[in-house]
Image (spheres, rainbow, N blue to C red):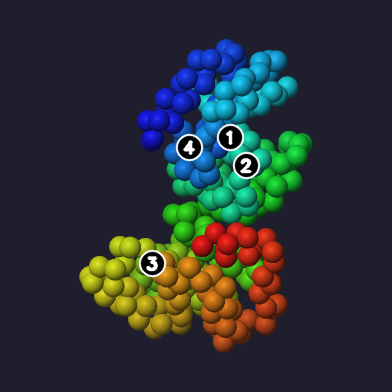
Amino acid sequence: MDPRLLDSCARARYRASADAVLTGVTALHLLGVEVGDPLPVRLATAGAAQTRDRTVRLHRLRDLPNSAGGVALPADAWLAAASDLDLLDLVTAGDTLGRLGRSTPAELQGLASARRGRSCRHARRAAGLVRDRVDSVRETWLRLCLVLVGLPEPRTNVVLGHGERLIGRVDLLLDEFGLVIEYDGDQHRDRGQWNTDLDRDDAFAEAGFTTIRVTRDRARRPRRLVEKVHARLVQRGYAGPAPTFTPEWVELFERRV
């Protein structure tokens, strides 16, 4: 946790009214979800207080978010963050809350559906894309990179075996087409890990699966990656629509690379 953020939050709460609650992206960072910029400090209050402090963004609300210790509860913080985060970051935050055991897709969906406001439609869409068992932000990125062009949605972190033999857990799996997609982080550069990956790929092939490995360099070319996945799906019987690269997708995946 950045001590400067803790100091900024402490100063903001000290100067604010007694009912003030840290919320939105700021609260998410305090909860261990480092998505978006936590500054200026987001505070919610039911009073008529105002501030000229540029390091604080004060939201006056009729109903304050549920909170503990002056910090919005995880799902409430996530919903408030919808006004600041784009779709990719908001889904990433939801997946991360699940990984940390702080919320569930069902809770986020329920809260987003029950609220009304400018950003609630955005939140409802994002909540519908949040999934359980997502182990990293790169897995979220990879899943949405495929789903938002209209390709089938892969399952996350599935344990595969062949007969009585356990092969291992995979990042993403498209069961119907026998396609495994793995994101290789820096740890996969190690020679021992690299050889282990090759052995796993051989075992997957023996079990009838084909594997696509996504490296950091491949992730820098998301359109080519999507086209590669689509081509492999077609080889394995996929007859659905081709990828559609919408302006939203371009903004989320190509302009942010």
Q: Which residue: 40% across, 78% down?
A: 204
Is residue 243 shown left or right of residue 219? Answer: right
Give the foreground label among 1 and 3.
Answer: 1
Q: Amino acid at mark 2?
A: Asp
- Answer above or below: position of 121 versus 226: above
Q: Which residue: 57% across, 27% down?
A: 54
Residue at the bottom extreme of this rendering: 235
- Answer above or below: position of 109 versus 16: below
Quadrant that contains the N terminus: top left
- The residue that mark 4 highlights is 29
Give the foreground label among 3 and 2.
Answer: 2
Kindly state the secondary structure of the residue where label 2 is placed: loop
Q: Are marks 2 and 1 in contact (CB under 8 Å)?
A: yes
Q: Amino acid at mark 4?
A: His
Q: In the rendered image, is residue 257 in sight?
A: yes
Is residue 161 shown left or right of residue 108? Answer: left
- The residue that mark 2 highlights is 84
Q: Which residue: 57% across, 12% down?
A: 18
Q: Are marks 3 and 2 in contact (CB under 8 Å)?
A: no
Q: Which residue: 42% across, 73% down?
A: 213
Q: In the rendered image, is residue 182 in sight?
A: no
Q: Work out how far the residue at label 4 is from the one at label 3, CA to CA, in angstroms.
A: 26 Å
Q: Work out how far the residue at label 4 is from the one at label 2, CA to CA, in angstroms.
A: 13 Å
> Which circle marks residue 193 in the picture?
none
> Which circle marks residue 184 in the picture?
3
Q: Are marks 1 and 3 in contact (CB under 8 Å)?
A: no
Kindly state the secondary structure of the residue where label 3 is placed: loop
Q: Report the front residue among 28 and 4.
A: 4
- The residue that mark 1 highlights is 24
Q: Work out how far the residue at label 2 is from the one at label 1, CA to CA, in angstroms.
A: 8 Å
Give the foreground label among 4 and 2.
Answer: 2
Q: Work out how far the residue at label 3 is from the one at label 2, CA to CA, in angstroms.
A: 30 Å
